[in-house]
Every structure is written in structure tokens, then in C-alpha cells.
């Protein structure tokens, strides 16, 4: 197509390019490309295709999927595996789920807040990023109804099914274990 | 010493080039398919491989900046890079200095504010050294960063020139470098600014301008080669994704 042309960083863009198109900047009164790619009349399309998650860092409010690695009475350590459910991170990063952020405020009774009644090591949880945390880990929260344990294995090794907001049942032994269960979609 | 040692009466240098002739610059973008961005650059016998990783989560979160990406550069010369086998020196100051020079050169050119709280790592590996290592490292870093798709305001095109026993020479080899003063410059061709300049030995003040202009002229030639390489590479990538009609 004649209207399209390859641009390299620093190249001036045609006047028709909109100023808020991505991958551009203004220098010396002219709109210029900041990546190598193709100028299509109104925007610049980078030649480099990057997966969305490869370059992303988490921000507050993001929903993440993580695996519980270790629990203590006060907090659970989480390996954050993916941003949302479809953008796996290349390197898992560390998250911390504190006891007071596991359940919504109205469920924070002493019994409900025992960490091993909420999550166990190996559980996969859906959580929200509560804050950027300290220099080591993001702080996570599973207080929302649709956040919490989504995949958990029973002591039999079978994947348990959620039966209520606080219990999951093993399909083999029918033993019920306590968890902070995420509300399955569509319920 | 007459000037004949490095520039013959016919105007040829030891390796057969004319005084104002740069060595052949060959480059390949995307040389390492697993890296986020990479480039391999050959400037005569000087060979450099650069790989870029990121932007991604900071490896050390202590140093992360909340409003911009942290740029980290590392430089490693292979033990056999200089001809004689030299085991890896630990805490090599020359390597650290070169890495810092590359970082300072690229920090203002890259749009680091677009990648807050993340880190970009540039690893420079010197495979073979024959003069102009800094220039080759800077040129290769430019290509690798563009290959990684990291937003930059301009290229940085580097070239060296020197005054060797009275002769003005472009793109010195290691042999010529050892005999004279070498000035390396990094040119930002889009804005005609100098982003990097280094002079390691003494040069008469009267000839600085002359040498500098010579080096800048070389850098403009380098720009032509680099931007052709980038355009070809972009064309190839867009073509393979079906975004451009061949």
C-alpha cells in the first residue's frame, strides 16, 4: 500500500498522524516515531510483536493468578503466575497475602481468619493487587467474592470442588476442607 | 618518525583503506531469537553481540524507580577477544567503565518514562576486539534496543577517528589506536546532537575540531548502514506477520 511506509526511531511522521497515536513523540515541532514499524496514515504500528504480559509490571487493582507456596499464621506467600487469566508472566514474581486481606471485613472472625482454613500451600488463587508492597513482594487481597481459591487438591490428591464460600469437597473421599473459595463464574 | 608507517605516500593505511574510509560494518538484528532484542555487529575484525532483556519486573526491587525504567548495562569481553587468551578479570574496571558509558549514552535517548517500575538490561559481549570497541558496542546496542521495540527518540551512531602520527584516520584499528589519539563520538543523527564523546589520550587542541568532524562524518555513514538494516529488518518482520504487502 502506497500510504504505508516503514519508519525508524526519529523519523518524522506525516502530518495526518494523530498526535496521541502510540509509539510517537514530538521533537523540534514535528511528530516522530519512537519505534521501528509502519506508519499507516494515522498511527505507527511497531514491527516488533510483544506479548502483552512480557513487558508488563503489575499495578494496583490488577487481577492476578498465583500459587500459594508457604503459609504462616499471619500471611501466605504467593508466586504470582499470571496477570489476569490469560497473560502468563515470564518470571513469576512474589506476592504476599496477609491474614487481614483474605476475607471481606464482615467475615473476619477469629476462626475464619486462621490462615490454614483459608488457603493451603499448592492452592491456586485468584487475587487482586492491593498495593505495590515492599521491596520484595506485592500485597494481594482475596476479599472480593470472586477472588479466592480456584484450584485446590485434597489430601487424596484429587482436585476438590467448591461447595460453599468456605468449603471445598474432595470427589474421592468426600472430605470437606476449609478454604476461602472464589465464587465460580456464573453462580 | 615519518607518517609513512600508518599512511603510505599513496594514501593507503596498513589494512589497505584510505584515511577517510571506515571498515566494513555488518550487522544483524535479532541474532538471538530468545532475547527480547539482540544485534550482532561486525566493524572490521571487531565483533560485538548485544542482547536486551526487558522491560520487565526489576530484578532488584530496591533500585526500581516508580516513574521510569531502570537501565542496566553489562559488558563482558570473552577471554580470547584480544588475541592472547586472557582469563576473565573479576571486577574489571575497564569493562565497568564501558558499561557505564553505554548506559549514560542511552539513558537520555530512550523513553524510559514509558516503562515505570521496570528494568531493561543490556548485555554487551565482545567476541573479538580490533579497535573501535566502544563504537561497535554503541551501534550494536542501538540496533538491539530497536529490535526489542523499546521506544527511543533517536539512533546513537558511533564512530571513531584519530590523529596517528600526524595522519587523520577514520575508524582506527587496534594497531592504529595504540600509536595515536583516538576520539570516539556517538551522534544522534535525527537531532544532530552528540550523545557521547570520549578522548582517551592527548590530542593538540588545534586538531580536535578536525578529528571531531572527521568522526562525525564517519558516524553519519554508520547511520546510513544502521537505518538500512533497521528498515530491512522491520520490513521482514512486518512481512512475516502479513502486515505489509511485499
Image (cartoon, coloured by chain):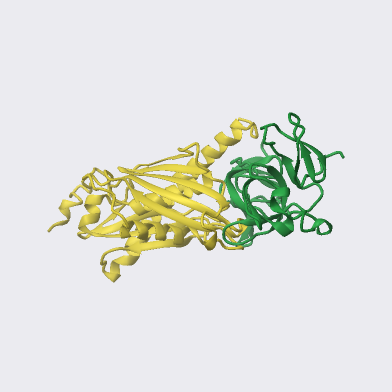
Could you tell me residue B179's position as x and y percent?
A: 20, 57
Could you tell me residue A160's position as x and y percent?
A: 74, 35
Residue at the image position 39 percent from the left and 55 percent from the top: B217
Residue at the image position 51 percent from the left and 47 percent from the top: B53
Furthest residue to the left? B1
**Residue A187 vs residue A77: left or right?**
right
Could you tell me residue B182's position as x and y percent?
A: 29, 59
Furthest residue to the right? A187
Residue at the image position 53 percent from the left and 43 percent from the top: B36
Residue at the image position 20 percent from the left and 51 percent from the top: B7
Res. B10 visible in picture: yes
How many marks the image carries: the answer is 0
Res. A66 visible in picture: no
Furthest residue to the bottom? B205
Q: As displayed, is residue B37 above or below residue B74?
A: above
Indicate the colour of chain A: green
Front in this rendered view, residue B101 or A117: A117
Front in this rendered view, residue B205 or A133: A133
**Residue B28 vs residue B244: left or right?**
left
Could you tell me residue B86's position as x and y percent?
A: 24, 48
| Location of residue A48 (image quadrant) | top right
**Residue B76 vs residue B6: left or right?**
right
Quarter of the image containing the C terminus of chain A? top right
Front in this rendered view, residue B142 or A7: B142
Front in this rendered view, residue A27 or B97: B97
The yellow one among the chains is B
Quarter of the image containing the N terminus of chain A? top right
Q: As displayed, is residue A111 above or below residue A90?
A: below
Amino acid at each position: 500500500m502506497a500510504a504505508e511506509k516503514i519508519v525508524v526511531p526519529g523519523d518524522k511522521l506525516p502530518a495526518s498522524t494523530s498526535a496521541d497515536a502510540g509509539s510517537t513523540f514530538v521533537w523540534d515541532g514535528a511528530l516522530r516515531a519512537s519505534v521501528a514499524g509502519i506508519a499507516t496514515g494515522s498511527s505507527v504500528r511497531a514491527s516488533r510483536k510483544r506479548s502483552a504480559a512480557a513487558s508488563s509490571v503489575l499495578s494496583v487493582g490488577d487481577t492476578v493468578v498465583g500459587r500459594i507456596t508457604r503459609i504462616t499464621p499471619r500471611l501466605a506467600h504467593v508466586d504470582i503466575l499470571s496477570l489476569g487469566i490469560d497473560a502468563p508472566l515470564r518470571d513469576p514474581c512474589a506476592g504476599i497475602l496477609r491474614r487481614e486481606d483474605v476475607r471481606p471485613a464482615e467475615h473476619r472472625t477469629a476462626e475464619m481468619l486462621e490462615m490454614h482454613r483459608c488457603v493451603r500451600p499448592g492452592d491456586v488463587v485468584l487475587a487482586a493487587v492491593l498495593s505495590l508492597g515492599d521491596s520484595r513482594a506485592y500485597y494481594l487481597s482475596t476479599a472480593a467474592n470472586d477472588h479466592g481459591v480456584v484450584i485446590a487438591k485434597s489430601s487424596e490428591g484429587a482436585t476438590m470442588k467448591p461447595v460453599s464460600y468456605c468449603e471445598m469437597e474432595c470427589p474421592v473421599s468426600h472430605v470437606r476442607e476449609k478454604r476461602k473459595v472464589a465464587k465460580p463464574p456464573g453462580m | 618518525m615519518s607518517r609513512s608507517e600508518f599512511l603510505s605516500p599513496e594514501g593507503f593505511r596498513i589494512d589497505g583503506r584510505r584515511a577517510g574510509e571506515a571498515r566494513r560494518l555488518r550487522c544483524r538484528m535479532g541474532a538471538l531469537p530468545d532475547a527480547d532484542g539482540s544485534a550482532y555487529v561486525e566493524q572490521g575484525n571487531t565483533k560485538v553481540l548485544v542482547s536486551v532483556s526487558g522491560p520487565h519486573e526489576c530484578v532488584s526491587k530496591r533500585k526500581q524507580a516508580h516513574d521510569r525504567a531502570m537501565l542496566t548495562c553489562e559488558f563482558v569481553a570473552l577471554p580470547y577477544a584480544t588475541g592472547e587468551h586472557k582469563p576473565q578479570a573479576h571486577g574489571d574496571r575497564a569493562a565497568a567503565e564501558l558499561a557505564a558509558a553505554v548506559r549514560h549514552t542511552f539513558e537520555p535517548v530512550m523513553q524510559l518514562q514509558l516503562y515505570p517500575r521496570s528494568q531493561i538490561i543490556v548485555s554487551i559481549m565482545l567476541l573479538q576486539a580490533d579497535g573501535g570497541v566502544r563504537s561497535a558496542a554503541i551501534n550494536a546496542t542501538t540496533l538491539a534496543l530497536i529490535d526489542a521495540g523499546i521506544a527511543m527518540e533517536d539512533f546513537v551512531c558511533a564512530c571513531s577517528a584519530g590523529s596517528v602520527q600526524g595522519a587523520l584516520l577514520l575508524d582506527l584499528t587496534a594497531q592504529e589506536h595504540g600509536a595515536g589519539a583516538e576520539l570516539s563520538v556517538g551522534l544522534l543523527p535525527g537531532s544532530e546532537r552528540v550523545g557521547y564523546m570520549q578522548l582517551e589520550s592527548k590530542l593538540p587542541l588545534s586538531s580536535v575540531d578536525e578529528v571531531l568532524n572527521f568522526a562525525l562524518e564517519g558516524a553519519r555513514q554508520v547511520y546510513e548502514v544502521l537505518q538500512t538494516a533497521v528498515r530491512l529488518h522491520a520490513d521482514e518482520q512486518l512481512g512475516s506477520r502479513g502486515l505489509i504487502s511485499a
